[in-house]
Amino acid sequence: MNIDEFSCVGKSVPKVDALSKVLGTARYAEDIKMSNMLYGKVLRAGVPHAVIEELDVSSARAMGGVACVLTARDVPGINRYGIAFADHYALAEDKVRYAGDPVALVAAETEEIAAEAIKAIKVKYRLLPVVSDLHEALAEGADRVHDERENLILHSKTRKGNIQEGFRKADVIVEETYTTQTVDHVYMETESGVAHIDETGMLVIQSANQCPFRDRRQVAMVLGIRENQVRVIKAVTGGAFGGKDDVTVEVHLALLAMATKRPVRLVMSREESLVSQSKRHPIEIWSRWGATKEGKLCAMEGRVYGDSGPYIGLGAFVVKKCGIHLSGPYYIPNLKVDSYSVYTNNTFNSAMRGFGVTQAAVAHESQIDRLASKLGINPLRFRLINALDVGLTNATGQKCDESVGIKPTLEILRQVVLKDPELKNMWEDLD
Amino acid sequence: MKKRGIGIGSMFYGIGYGFSRQDIGAATVEICEDGSVIVRSGEVDYGQGSDTIFCQIIAEELGVDYAEIKLITADTLTTPNAGPTSASRVTYVTGKAMMKAATEVRETMREVAEEKLGMQDLMFANGQVFSMSHPEKNISFARLAKATHLAGRSVVATAWQDITTKDVDPETGQGDAYSTYAWASQIAVVEVDTETGKIEVLRVVAAHDVGKAINPKNVEAQIEGGVATGLGYALEEQILINKGIVQNTTLSEYMVPTSMDVPVIESHIVEVPALEGPYGAKGVGEPALIPTAPAILNAIANAVGVRVTALPANLENLHRLIREQENNNKDKS
Amino acid sequence: MQSFQFYSPNYLEDALKYIADRKQTCRTLAGGTDLIPMLKKEEIRPDYLLNINEVGELKGVEDLDNQVRIGATTTFTEMIESETLNRFFPLLVNAAASVGGPQIRNRGTIGGNVITNGPCADVLPGIVALDGQLELQSKQDGRRLVSVADVLVTAYETSIRSDELLTGILIQKPVQGTKSGFEKLGRRNAMAKARLNLSIALRQDPNGTISAVSIVPGAVMPVAVRMNDVESMLLGRKPTPVLIQAAADKLVEVVVNTAGIRWSSEYKVPVLKNIFKRVMWRVLAEDPQ
């Protein structure tokens, strides 16, 4: 296709939302005000693993200005949700599994009253051992995050070629364990939304989200109503990066609006967001890479341990995707990767921009550089030698048959370096 | 002492959900009697720019002005389910559904125009529909819209694009896991203060294969945002957790990069078209960030010879590694 | 945030009367960069809030005969832009420029930096290094001058009375030939609390002998304080690598003895040494002003 054939595609037209954002007229969920609106707030556990022995909301309910206080007992439908697997409690029942677990909800006439009511709720916890370390979580007889299930969520495998034979061909081998940390999405807008019952009796939720349809399915399940009785609208959303892929405020808003039959707004503070909302998985990756003295990759073996926290969310997929991508954009004839996603009582870890591949790349790119260094080959050149190309197969045996752009990206960077004396000076061995 | 180094990071990224997870985009295109256009899609634009991309695709397919399009998105009552905004799938999947829906409506309108103009070689461009061989045979898009309505023909089309793949084999992980892949490489230049462990990222050069840049400035914006995120990931961002309890709960303690920390970023767009994507486009949202941290880590190794294996490469961690290396060198000498 | 009565006088006299009547139940609002977050988190719940930003005599830098007066509500931005400060006290200008980001510097004040007395303060150590005096005023006692070092009790605590208002900071103009250096190390290049900072002022004889020196590290001690033991090691001697190394060792010894070994010492001790050595050498290499 010739670029001149296009009238609009390929042109840097202004973004349709640019003006409203620059002028401040874009209406985020927090900007939505409805008459008779209540303010919602969530009581978070504050302890990472405990049995709830007593939960007393009576004084909070009795406070002036408090419209409702809800606990797990007030959930009309199934008290569970989750995108892949419904293990996430709308409100904690007998126990809490991380410090951000929601225990009770309040809706009140003002935010201040809601905050006071939250403080008035009394919870007595019996603390349980905290499952915080990945390997301890997987050990025989480990304390369980979910009593009815093992801490291992999913073990996925990649097997290609013959790993022993592959390493026999290797002239150089590098082996290392890489660990990545937990990070937050830090969108400018924290999780927020407004819910109300419209004139037809339909529950309407306007929130910052990544998929209103998924939210609708999960809300309907928890409320025990049909999906056509729930309308989820994405309000103008100030960033998400995967952190608003799982349900954030929607289920709680729905419960409060249904219980009070009034509009309710819920806006998380940054602190609440950092403690209770999803994060990037910390992943531990062990891997061993082999290459021949000519600079050809011949074998790779890896083990990936991802900490998904107390609920699966999208965690099992994140860790599986990490494993599938652990080879990097290179042709490796023999490989073996095992990936494990694991429950712990740490933060709830789910989707974040890069979805496991961010962590995989830290490991494979470090290993590639170490091999290049051992072989005395420039790292960019080493990548060019091993980059996938049309006709080759990737880690899952999928044949690259279209849109394989790794070599062109490397070639562009090679040209940039060769033409720039400062860069060339740092990479004298690049030809 | 301050030492400079260069490093590179590359990546590939499976676009969409892959391994049998449902992955369907959708769009509905409706032409009003005056030729203005309403587009409905369940897809979410949370700032990344997909609403703009969609308008560009519709404008392209119908040959109308970009400002003629009213887009309604992400409302379960009024828009078709297009799946979530994630997995760098939106342009690739729902962008293609847009193209399909617009094409379907346009082809209906073409039939009406062919009857009216008596010509077959019609082109839709600049708000006009005209014969390529006899440009004087033409009708405005607006009048054709009215004519199509009057003819009782459908001016609404909904299209779906399904890129759901088969799952990989559970025992071997072998199979066609993803519909297509994005590719990228980035170079980082860093300066390491060996006395404090402080790292300054001086420059990032990014090259991304996006299949086709539907809006090049928006692609650059995605890359720049991604690099900033990757830089924070490499250097100072970390949720500190002690026995399950988050220790840093404010943004004065959880350190995202500021504009003073983000370097000059040069973006190079590579276009190796993806067969199933609109005009060959695939995604860039996640690929934008993935090579950055590895490029920085490799640049640190190039500058000072130490390899960070436990992220982040913050002041304390890097300083400790540099001291360990100094001590090792002393032991050897 | 708890509700409070807000008072915004134009005259110092009114401000002093207001706090004299209310004492501990009243807090003073200058830039608000520390106070407002504390109010929001309800770490403090004052009944009264006195806004001193409208009091004219508290604002701006004055060049007096042999000293400079910096009004308490002079912002960091105003300090950076002050010709007088750039001429006489580049140390304070550099310190002010390292605070937060532009928005914080537009709001935050030198008086607030002193009164908050945070261990990570950026400008306060410079004031201590320059032997600054605080001008305190109250309805009861009128005006009094105290050495800044004398009021810094411990982190976030000063001995300034609750009926007193800090109205200005007075610093003697430096003796001809005084040089200074400042360095701040943060986790990022803006909006970062100091992991460490260091303020140094010194003078050398024509033959190179150190004739005056003042050293104040920040973010390692409970309060900003001059390192007398280190200074006395350097005084009257010519700088040599051995001497500067010994001074660096002494500096961290004093810090560890005062502040104790903390989790951060493993990093801060060697890095403080490094920063001290390089700031010292940088200052020593500079031509006197």
Image: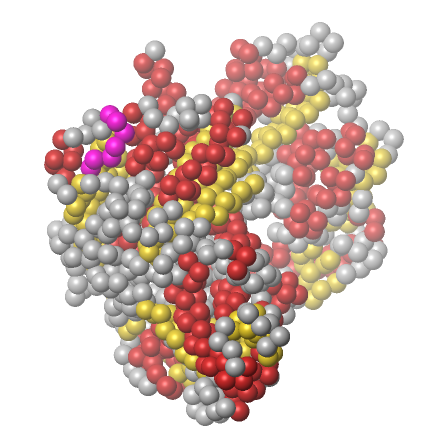
Give the side of residue A403 with respect to residue A113, left or right: left
Q: Residue at x 48, y 48 (%)?
A: B269
**Way the structure is coloured:** secondary structure
Above or below, comparing residue C125 to residue B213 in the picture: above
Q: Is residue A223 magenta?
A: no
Task: Between residue A230 and residue B63, name the one nearer to us.
Answer: B63
Q: Quadrant of residue C67?
A: top right
Task: Between residue B172 and residue A142, name the one nearer to us.
Answer: B172
Q: Position of residue B165 (x, y in %)?
A: 26, 63
Q: Residue at x 79, y 30 (%)?
A: C87
Q: Residue at x 55, y 70 (%)?
A: B133
Task: Between residue C236 and residue B211, name the one nearer to us.
Answer: B211
Q: Position of residue A49 (x, y in %)?
A: 28, 60
Magenta-drawn segment = A293-299
Q: Position of residue A242 (x, y in %)?
A: 40, 60
Residue A273 visible from this viewpoint: no
* Furthest-right residue in this view: C65
Q: State the quadrant of the C terminus of chain B.
A: top left
Above or below, comparing residue B6 to residue C287 in the picture: below
Task: Between residue B190 and residue C85, name the one nearer to us.
Answer: B190
* Furthest-top residue in this view: C207
Q: Position of residue C95 (x, y in %)?
A: 66, 36
Q: Is residue A297 magenta?
A: yes
